[in-house]
Amino acid sequence: MKQIEKVILNLKEEISQRKNRKLNMKLRTFLDQLGYKRRNSLLIDKVNQCLDKNSLAIIVKEKDLDWSELDIDERVTFEIIEGEGKTMQNLVESKYAGMIKVSEERNPIELYLHQTEALQALDKNITNNHANRFSGLLVIPTGGGKTLTAVQWVLRNVINNNKKVLWVAHRHELLEQALYAVKKNSFSNLLSKRKEFKYRIISGQHDRPVNIKEDDDFIIASTDSLNRGINYLVNNWLNYNDEIFLVVDEAHHATAKTYRKLIDLLNEKSNRLGILGLTATPFRTAEVEKGLLKKIFKDDIVYKVDLRTLISRGILSEPIFKELETEIDMTKELSEQDIKRIQAFDSIPEDIAKHIAENKVRNNRIVQEYIDNKDEYGKLLVFCSKQNTCD
């Protein structure tokens, strides 16, 4: 494969000074294909990662210019060998989109009883459903394997039959968890009719909707990114595929406008649409939202197992709750609805979660509690609800 010869950092006027208009247009088109209307530092970061990953050389036009210190309004262009734009695009995409090869070996993952029961319930309610529409909920407590269960079902019943899957969630961690499960479960006993299939993961931290292709089989995406690039989803994918299976992770959020807009669009564009919502809590705190959830998932709960059952089977641990006073009052920054959602273990606003996670007084109080009672607590595993809390 030919390599990129040069990467030129353009200080404002480089593009206008280029005499080769044909190549100049190619460069502009190439940048637009990456999904960035503004050629800013986000693009520079992404290209920089790609160059490092593929051991490609960087040749800076201005020797004294530091690549990492570009201002957000400074343009970046590429001087490349004729015809290599597509190759570069594929390199940039490779981390977030590509082909998953189906292993001929048997999947080594053994499911728990409740997961097997869930798969049987899904077969009964969805596979044997002769109507063109289905929308139901899979309710399994946190830690009980909702993602694994749903991934195995859609691989065997949707991807294996050459139909398309759209998997949506509202957090990056959930998207990456889903992709990990897809890759780890691509075995021939689930995908007997497929040798390979294409995936794409879309969010503010991954690929862009502009890169969606007609033959993408499994799209994993954040609702916000999809709604911002909704025209690409329609023109590049939905217009060519009329049998879609939608999985909504953390489905109790599906009453939000961003979710409803997407679901309404899929109902309009798809002749056969299946919707499976995954949740540990199939309700929202507000009464009006409980009614909306029922309207979205009209076939109600397909399968449900409760926390007590999984604890009794030794799958989940028995929680022992202990409250520690930190003398920090967070309620001043929260609305009444925020407080109710936190109490219901529904959600914590991002800015509040970040503020709590970075509070040194609170963190020291928690650590000191363990140090003072380490003989009682023994070995410690810390579970955090968000990645920034772990950091």
Image (spheres, helix red, strand yellow):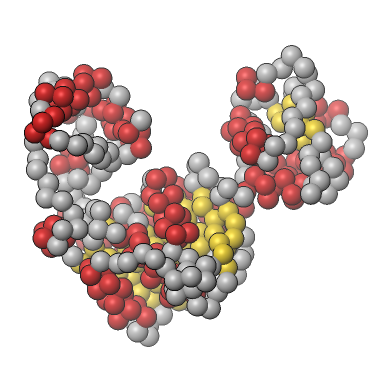
Q: Nearer the viewer, residue 265 or 57?
A: 57
Quadrant in which residue 190 is drawn = bottom left
Residue, far right = 19
Residue pictured at 62% horizontal, 64% vertical:
214
Q: Nearer the viewer, residue 242 or 345?
A: 345
Can I make out residue 261 in this image? Answer: no
**In the image, residue 138 above or below residue 321:** below
* Quadrant location, the C terminus: top left
Residue 247 falls left or right of residue 42: left
Q: Nearer the viewer, residue 286 or 101?
A: 101
Q: Position of residue 378 (x, y in %)?
A: 15, 35
Residue pictured at 54% horizontal, 56% vertical:
200
Q: Position of residue 47 (x, y in %)?
A: 65, 36
**In the image, residue 215 above or below residue 70:** below
Residue, far top = 64
Residue 209 falls left or right of residue 375: right
Q: Position of residue 284 (x, y in %)?
A: 21, 53
Residue pictured at 48% horizontal, 70% vertical:
105
Residue 234 falls left or right of residue 148: right
Quadrant in which residue 261 is drawn = bottom left
Quadrant in which residue 112 is drawn = bottom left
Can I make out residue 293 in this image? Answer: yes
Q: Position of residue 279 (x, y in %)?
A: 27, 58
- Number of marks in picture: 0
Residue 320 falls left or right of residue 273: left
